[in-house]
Image (cartoon, rainbow, N blue to C red):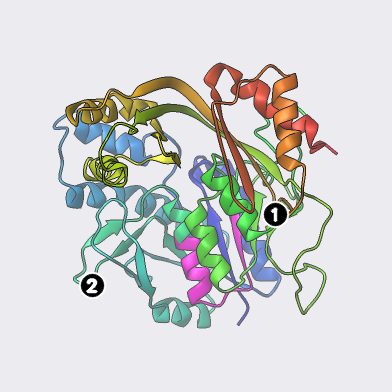
Amino acid sequence: MRIVVQKFGGTSLATAERRALVASKVSEAVHSGYSPVIVVSAIGRSGDPYSTDTFLNMVKGIHPDLPKRELDLLMSCGEVISGTVLVSTLNSRGLKAVLFTGGQAGIITNDDFGDARIIRVEPGEILEQLAEGKVVVVTGFQGVTESGQITTLGRGGSDTTASALGVALDAETIDIYTDVEGIMTADPRIVDDARILDTVTYNEICQLAYQGAKVIHPRAVEIAMQRNIPLRIKSTFSDAPGTLVTNMHPDREVGTDITSDRIIAGIAHTPSVTQLRVLTVNDPDIHLTDKRIFKAMALADISVDFISVQPEAVLYTVSDEIAAKAVSILQNMGFQPDVVASCAKVSIVGAGIAGVPGVMADMVEALSDAGVTILQSADSHTTIWVLVHKEDMVTAVQSLHKKFKLEV
């Protein structure tokens, strides 16, 4: 049995015309000899009648503190609605389709309501339906605990569902359909000549996603990478080939590591972050102070990023929306942090960065020539990050895209 997993986002399911396009993609897979497993998100986006955010706003207007267990029950409704509508659409076109919730599909999670992690997938029921020649539609973004409680998988949960099913079913490929034609070298709303990447590695797309690109959730990529199952990011609304995500050469049966002269794959950005600088030089035990600072942030459920621990200070960033909370905690601990609000993190990502001299020099030169001040920097084997003022973000992205000739 040749299995393909196809995931369709909420914009792809928002109207009857768009659902017809989805049905044609599914029909094409069937006629090509595949057994499709379809993963769906909730219909539409915030403001649309059946979107997840619309459901949440409905109850938050009544009481702001609905328990997480009940929130997960509510948030699971959107995918059930979209899945039922899609099954009806497929059946109307002569395709035998059946709908499974995440739990019915065998997706078992821990009990971390709102951001559950998949423990395992038991795909037996899906395989039985596929063997009968049916198209299986699965509600994304959700699973069940060992005791049968409904959970949701957090942001990007439908992507995660698709990858987990792809691995469990040993699918030939996982196709992520969205409203863009693939992974681009930069945000096209910022860079006019951004182009679609034909191929990226798992590590590159993970880093692009972590640094702000929102086409696919990095957790989904990490799951697919465990079994080297190719991912393809495609558009529901065109026949463009999209972007292939794999470490295997697409033209060979026996894969090898992708080799390329390309050093940089793309530029990503994350706006609206605040830099905090906490002086520790006068504390008697600097190591204990560093530990106390990050422990306090963790206990307050504050996610920190761009961490730099220096002999005389600790620097890190938090999102603008929780910066005041983080500052208040530090002040209660006796610190007076230096605060730089309204910053942005700009990143260059590429599997070819490691071991190549001059990449950081080129990055600094491009930003300097563009008049962009670097507030902080860091690097890894695939990524170099810089923190800049938010008003410089667009200039930084554009100048780096041009410097590394990503439009070519």
**Residue 148 sits in which quadrant?**
bottom left
| Rendering coords of residue 188 (x, y %) | 68, 31
In the image, residue 302 sits, relative to residue 39, either above or below, namely above
Q: Which residue is denoted by mark 1 in the rendering?
A: 354
Left or right, 181 with reference to 138: right
Residue plotted at (57% across, 59% down): 93
Image point (25%, 67%), residue name: 145
Q: Residue at x 22, y 40 (%)?
A: 300
What stretch of residues is rendered in magenta? 161-176
Q: Earlier in the sequence, mark 1 or mark 2?
A: 2
Q: Is residue 81 above or below residue 347?
A: below
- In terms of secondary structure, where does tag 1 sit? loop
Assign the C terminus to one quadrant of the image: top right
- Residue 324 place in picture, x, y as percent: 28, 24
Relative image position of residue 115 (x, y in whole percent): 32, 53
Residue where numbered disc 2 is placed: 146
